Image: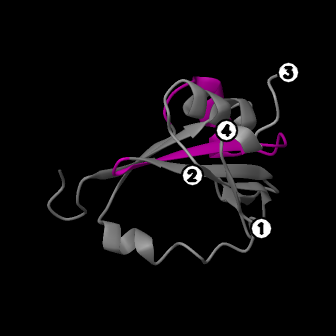
Amino acid sequence: MSRLFGGVIQNGYVVRDIEAAMRHWIDVLGVGPWFYIDHLPVADFQYKGQPSPVDISLALANSGTLQIELIQQRNDAPSLYLDFLHAGYLDNVTLGKSSLIKGLYGKCPGQPRTLTKSALSPPR
C-alpha cells in the first residue's frame, strides 16, 4: 500500500467486446451490476502529443473494495487503449483513497446505465 495514495482501488482492462466482457464478469465471476456508457464523449484526447478522435465505451463495477474498469475502443484512432489491446495485458491499476473517488461519480457527461445479467443481450 502506498502511504501517499492509499491501496489499489481499481484494475482497468481494455477489451475487444465490452458486452461479452461484462457478461463474463457477471456469469463467471459474480461481479456486477455494471455502470456502462456506450460511446463516452471524450473531449480533447491526445496521444503522443497529437489530437486523436478516440471513441470508447466504458463500464465500471465493484468487487468488494476493488473497482473493475472495462474499456472498449470503437474506432482505430491512435491511442493507449489500442496499444494495451495489442499488448494483451492489464491497462491500469489505480491507487487511491475512497474519498478521492467519491467526488468523481455524477460528473460524467454521457448517459450512464446500470447493467445486470438480465439487461445484457444474449450471447452471440
Separation (CA) of disc 2 from disc 1: 14 Å
Counting residues from the start of the chain, the first of labels 2 and 1 encountered is 2
Residue furthest out toward the front: 118
Taking depth in this image into account, of 54 and 48 the one nearest to the observer is: 54
Foreground label between 3 and 4: 4
What residue is shown at x 53% (from left), y 49% (from top)?
A: 61
Counting residues from the start of the chain, the first of labels 1 and 3 encountered is 1
Taking depth in this image into account, of 77 and 90 the one nearest to the observer is: 90
**Where residue 124 is drawn, which disc sits there?**
3
**Where residue 60 is drawn, which disc sits there?**
2
Asked if 4 appears above or below 119 in the picture, the reply is: below
Q: Quadrant of residue 27?
A: top right
Q: Quadrant of residue 73?
A: top right
Check disc 4 and report the residue beneath it: 117
Is residue 78 on the magenta stretch? yes
What residue is shown at x 82% (from left), y 35% (from top)?
A: 121
Counting residues from the start of the chain, the first of labels 4 and 1 encountered is 1
Is residue 100 on the magenta stretch? no
Counting residues from the start of the chain, the first of labels 2 and 3 encountered is 2
**Mark 1 vs 3: CB contact within 8 A:** no
The magenta segment: 64-90
Foreground label between 4 and 1: 4
Separation (CA) of disc 1 from disc 3: 25 Å
Counting residues from the start of the chain, the first of labels 2 and 4 encountered is 2
Foreground label between 2 and 4: 4
Q: Residues within 10 Å of mark 1 (few under 14, many from 20)?
A: few
Check disc 1 and report the residue beneath it: 111
Left or right: 102 as drawn, with respect to 82: left
